[in-house]
Amino acid sequence: MRKLHPSHQTMEDIHALVFSEPKEGVDRWHAMIVPDTTGDTKIMWTAGNPDEIETAKRSFDDLRKKGFMIYKVGKDNGPGELMKEFDPKAEMLIAVPPIVGG
């Protein structure tokens, strides 16, 4: 898993990386975008790296325990699908922090 600081990759860069056809012999990238005080953190993994998948799953589970809702989104930017369990094949996940009332 790679955690990228927001200044390293824009959402457009991540979108292009995740939704483009990978080069032959190269694993497809997957991403989970998590809003935070720096803007967001991008958690990246590839299907061929079990350690990255396990770390991404742990991050997913930790965020769900904190009340985040996590949506799987497609390249068409249509409505997301609420995910209750981590799917390592999901191309892109967007974590939405819990809303706090005042």
Image (cartoon, grey):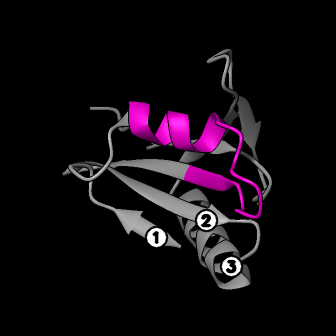
- Which class describes the residues within 10 Å of circle 3: few (<14), some (14-19), or many (20+)? some
**In the rendered image of this protein, does residue 1 appear above or below residue 7?**
below
- Which class describes the residues within 10 Å of circle 2: few (<14), some (14-19), or many (20+)? many
User: Measured from the top left, where is residue 1 in percent x and y?
Assistant: 54, 73
- How many numbered marks have been drawn onto this rendered protein structure? 3
Q: Nearer the viewer, residue 64 or 28?
A: 28
**Drawn side of residue 47 relative to residue 66, left or right:** right
- Identify which amino acid the numbered label 1 is placed on: Arg
Residue at (26%, 50%) from the top-left corner?
6
Q: Secondary structure at mark 2?
A: strand
Specify which label sits upstream in the sequence, 1 or 3. Answer: 1
Mark drawn on residue 2: 1
**Drawn side of residue 55 relative to residue 82, left or right:** left
Q: CA distance from mark 2 to mark 1?
A: 7 Å
| Residue 99 can be seen, yes or no | no
Residue 27 drawn in magenta: yes
